[in-house]
Each structure stands twice: as C-alpha cells, then as structure tokens.
Image (cartoon, rainbow, N blue to C red):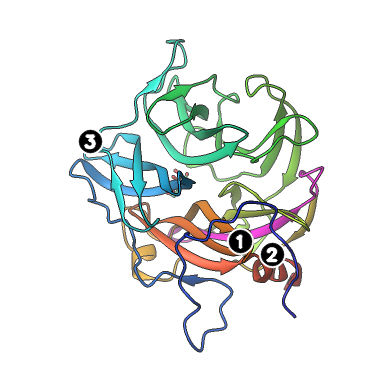
Amino acid sequence: MKNQVRVIGQPQPNIPWEERPQGSEAIIWRSKRNPIIPRDLIPTSNSIFNSAVVSFQGKFAGVFRCDNKARDMQLHRGFSENGVDWVIDEEPIFFVCEDPEIKYVSGYDPRVCFIEDRYYISWCNLYHNHPTIGLAYTFDFEKFYQMENALLPFNRNGVLFPKRINGNYAMLSRPSDNSHTPFGDIYYSESPDLTYWGRHRLVMKATAGWQSTKIGAGPVPIETTEGWLLIYHGVLTSCNGFVYSFGAALLDPDEPWKVINRSSEYLMSPQESYECMGDVPNVVFPCAALCDAPTGRLAIYYGAADTVVAMAFTTIGELIDFVKAKK
Ligand code: BMA
C-alpha cells in the first residue's frame, strides 16, 4: 500500500521529473539524460560532481564542485531554467569574508539550505589545510558572505536542517581524519546563532555491508509527517578500494538524533558506466534533492565517479515505505 505520508514544504511543480521506466519496479530510477552535467561543462574544469541545487526565483540555482585542471577543488555558482541544463560560472565563487583567519581557499562537497530568509552554503572547507565545515550565506546568488567555520577539524559532510529545531539551528556532520578516512558516523550539533555549536549527539553509526566503513549525510533532510527523511551515503571497503552507495533513514521530528527507521539495503549503488568509471570509480554521492511537496516527487542530484553530476527520481511515499521495510 502506498504510504500516505505528507511532505511539510512548498509546492515546486517545475522540478525535473521523469516517470518510472515502463515495466520497472525500482524504488529509484536514473534520469535518461544522465550524466546531466559533463566533466568539461566549463573550460577550466577537470571534473564537476558532488554539487547542490535549490529552487530560486521560480527557476534553479546551485553551488557546484568544480575541480580545475591544476586539481584545486573549487566552488562555482550556476543557474538553470529547468534544473537539468546548467550554466556554471567559469570563475569560482568569491566569498566576502572580513576575517582573514577563516577565509576561503578551496572547498568541496557543497550543500545549499534555505532557512528563513536566505540560502546557506555548507561545504568541506580547508582550515590550515585540514578539512572542517565551512559556512556562508547568500540572499541572491550574487554576493556570498562567509561565516565562521562551524566545527573543528577534522570534519566533513556538514548538512544543515532547513528550520530551527527546538529554537536552535541544527546540523549533521561526520567527524573524520585528514585523509580518506576509513571510519565515520553521523553526528547532530545545534547552535543558537550558527557560530557557536554544541549539544553534540550521535545519530547513527556505520554498520554492515554497503555502509560498513563510514556514512555521511547527503542532501538537506526533508521534513515529513513521519519525521525527517535523510538520504545518506554509505561506504564499503572492497579489495579495490571504497564503494560509495546511498540509502535513507527516518529521524525523529523533534529529536533528530533519534533514528526511527533506517534502510538495511542501499537505495542506489554504482552500477552505470558513468558511476563505475571516472576519476574515482564506484561512487554515487548525493548532495541535493528537490521535492514537490503536494506530489512527493523527488529529484536527487548526485556526483558520479567524482567526475560528473547525475540525477535520479523517486517519491517520498515510496522512499519511506522502503526505509520502513528494513529488509
Ligand atoms: C570523499 C569526498 C568526496 C568524494 C569521495 C569519493 O572523501 O572527498 O568528495 O566523492 O571521497 O572519492
């Protein structure tokens, strides 16, 4: 039976959408146009992947991870009329930052989250060459203002919740090391002002199979009548290295560090050629999702093989049924 869950959010009827392929019973299906962003969309890029998009002024805007041909990791701004065809700036974003001690040097794996009156960008920022969670905001995708780094090194995959919870801003993150981190669990932190963070709580640990090595939050959590729906990546260590897949979990609406349900099977693993071949083979890494609240349609944006951006579709009802099935 189809789940009657409702999304607590705005109608976004113009998000990209493709019907499930005929004859398929898959919970999630890839765009026929994948990869939607090629590695060389801008002349300076080696690769464009792990990127975040949002609805903006009736169209779409985003912050893209573009690794350049010197292999510096940079964040670039982009716009789209339809969420599929993107125009990305050739120059990286310039972050206005009054404090030279925290200024942006390079960054990767951005997420974009609208809270109250502005868009916040969180990303993996290098502080004295150590990864931590950078934060900035923009009202218009023209000027970007950098804030204090949210947490201490070493940390990655900082993802904000789209509203205050119990009066405080809230963030998921994944404490890590300075390298390719062979461990990692998801934690919750809260802040009254997005500067001072505390009340850290464990949300979930890496467990087994596709999520046995480490896990990290993906797109901004989606608020539903059954709790926060979190799409997250999980990593398995094979004899040839890491394999990045993604799954989903349902978190308590008021105390999101409490997990209501969590999928034991992955939702998507790297299987298509553009997910298995590239600069880092066998990676699907979701950083954004656009949701149309009335229909529950969901368009998930993910980086593939650390090389290109791809898109996949599902609906919130089916996703929550999948999370609850606990196979
Ligand atoms: C992680 C991050 C991601 C990347 C993944 C696979 O540590 O650096 O940006 O997609 O590794 O290489």
Near-viewer residue (85 or 32):
85
Q: Amino acid at mark 3?
A: Ala
Cβ atoms under marks 1 and 3 closer than 8 Å: no
Q: Amino acid at mark 2?
A: Ser
Q: Which residue is mark 2?
A: 263
Q: Secondary structure at mark 1?
A: strand
Q: Amino acid at mark 1?
A: Gly
Left or right, residue 326 beside residue 88: right
Q: Between disc 2 and disc 1, whose residue precedes?
A: 1
Mark 2: C-beta under 8 Å from nearest atom of ligand 1: no
Pinpoint residue 260: horizontal percent, then vertical percent: 80, 56
Pinpoint residue 313: horizontal percent, then vertical percent: 51, 67
Please provide the residue range marked out in magenta. Answer: 238-258
Does residue 242 appear anywhere in the picture?
no
Task: Answer whether residue 249 is magenta in the image.
Answer: yes
Q: Secondary structure at mark 2?
A: loop
Q: Which mark is residue 189?
A: none
Q: Which residue is mark 3?
A: 70
